[in-house]
Image: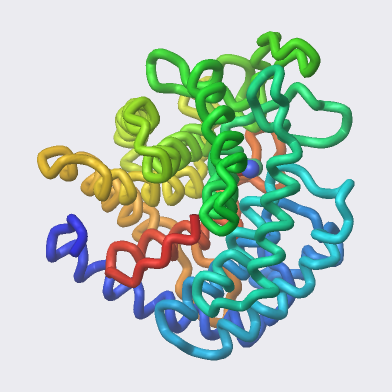
């Protein structure tokens, strides 16, 4: 049984009912297309535009979560269909980057964990090999992106690392875990700032491993505080602690969580896109809120009983505020959580429904209602 007040669990049960109706309608309508942002209430198939894209695992992740929660075959069959489509990406090495964790934890490791499918396990191990191969031993970090940027490491990568812990578990080979731990240590050293805020990107010299720079990323600019990056840190360090037991990772997650909650409280728990941007214009990002909420729920499971209240209440306030103000339950329209933002300086995908907002919202509600399936 989790830490949550009865009234909040009752609320989450009610929301779960709405998720079931919405997801069933979407699964029937969307099928094995790969959704991102709905246009006029309809998703289009992003798989046709870029099969390697980091968001492509969230739809199968939502489907596997719903399969686990409901046992309904439509979710399993549709998720499998998307998983097979993603083979085109897995078989084309040069298009892959560090986000193979986001993609194949959701598409294949989830499948293997729920069904024991051996092909899914092979896909997961192959993706883990790709992720480990991006490790730079001079700087002890995983290189994020392609395009001649071998020195870039980013906060988001912490969420890819559970693929490596899983691969070590499966193979009995600790190398995957060592890579994950070394990367996490480097992120702790250079990405998390002393006040609990985080850089998005740091750049290392890929030959010497020397720290070079911390340019701006998807937030306002250098030295700002991109809220989704802070959310990745809350959840990512909590996961690192779960897998390694290293107390410095738990402390880092808590430190960033305190900073996140203090900022989110200022806007009634619908987070700004960047906590350290000019007062105007005001841009929100609900995806940061739902990701942080899932990280906070994990923290409630990792901390002592007297500490659970802070993280549990924080998670509930984020999820409730976002549901009240920004969720659409119309079954005839694709997309649940509105006001997600991919990037500060790009209007096209700012304050819109984004598939990963829906994924983390659903994960949070399933975890609040004891329908857990930790995909990470
Ligand atoms: N991992 C990319 C993002 O958070 O937008």
Query: Number of callouts in the render?
Result: 0
Quick check: 367 left or right of 68?
left
Give coordinates of residue 48: x percent, y percent.
85, 66
Please say whether residue 39 is visible from this viewpoint: no
Give coordinates of residue 252: x percent, y percent.
38, 27
Give coordinates of residue 16: x percent, y percent.
35, 74
Foreground residue among 143 and 292: 143
Please say whether residue 321 is visible from this viewpoint: yes
Quick check: 105 left or right of 30?
left
Foreground residue among 368 and 134: 134
Where 247 sits versus 327, above or below? above
The residue sitting at 40% across, 78% down in the picture is 69
The residue sitting at 52% across, 61% down in the picture is 359
Quick check: 369 left or right of 102?
left
The residue sitting at 56% across, 28% down in the picture is 182
Give coordinates of residue 266: x percent, y percent.
32, 32
The residue sitting at 89% across, 46% down in the picture is 94
Quick check: 187 left or right of 314?
right
Where 228 sits versus 48, above or below? above
Task: State the quadrant of the N terminus.
Answer: bottom left
Foreground residue among 147 and 172: 172
The quarter of the image that holds ligand 1 is: top right
């Amino acid at each position: 049984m989790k830490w949550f007040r009865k009234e909040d669990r009752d609320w989450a049960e009610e929301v779960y009912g709405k998720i079931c109706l919405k997801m069933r309608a979407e699964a029937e309508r969307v099928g094995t297309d790969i959704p991102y942002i709905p246009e006029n209430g309809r998703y289009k198939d992003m798989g046709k535009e870029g099969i390697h894209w980091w968001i492509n695992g969230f739809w199968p992740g939502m489907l596997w979560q719903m399969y686990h929660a409901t046992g309904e075959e439509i979710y399993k069959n549709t998720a499998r269909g998307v998983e097979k489509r993603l083979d085109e990406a897995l078989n084309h090495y040069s298009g892959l980057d560090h986000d193979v964790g986001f993609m194949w934890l959701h598409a294949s490791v989830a499948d293997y964990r729920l069904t024991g499918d051996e092909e899914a396990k092979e896909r997961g191990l192959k993706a883990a090999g790709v992720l480990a191969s991006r490790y730079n031993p001079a700087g002890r970090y995983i290189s994020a992106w392609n395009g001649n940027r071998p020195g870039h490491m980013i906060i988001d990568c912490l969420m890819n690392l559970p693929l490596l812990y899983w691969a070590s578990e499966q193979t009995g080979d600790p190398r995957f875990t060592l890579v994950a731990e070394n990367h996490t240590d480097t992120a702790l050293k250079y990405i998390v700032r002393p006040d609990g805020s985080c850089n998005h990107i740091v750049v290392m010299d890929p030959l010497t491993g020397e720290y070079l720079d911390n340019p701006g990323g998807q937030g306002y600019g250098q030295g700002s505080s991109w809220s989704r990056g802070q959310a990745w840190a809350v959840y990512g360090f909590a996961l690192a602690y779960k897998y390694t037991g290293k107390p410095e990772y738990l402390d880092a997650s808590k430190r960033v969580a305190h900073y996140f909650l203090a900022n989110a409280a200022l806007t009634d728990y619908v987070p700004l896109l960047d906590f350290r941007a000019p007062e105007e214009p005001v841009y929100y990002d609900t995806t940061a809120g739902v990701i942080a909420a899932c990280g906070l729920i994990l923290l409630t499971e990792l901390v002592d009983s007297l500490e659970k209240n802070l993280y549990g209440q924080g998670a509930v306030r984020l999820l409730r505020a976002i549901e009240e103000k920004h969720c659409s339950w119309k079954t005839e329209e694709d997309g649940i959580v509105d006001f997600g933002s991919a990037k500060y300086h790009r209007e096209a995908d700012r304050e819109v429904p984004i598939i990963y907002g829906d994924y983390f919202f659903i994960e949070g509600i399933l975890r609040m209602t004891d329908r857990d399936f930790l995909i990470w």
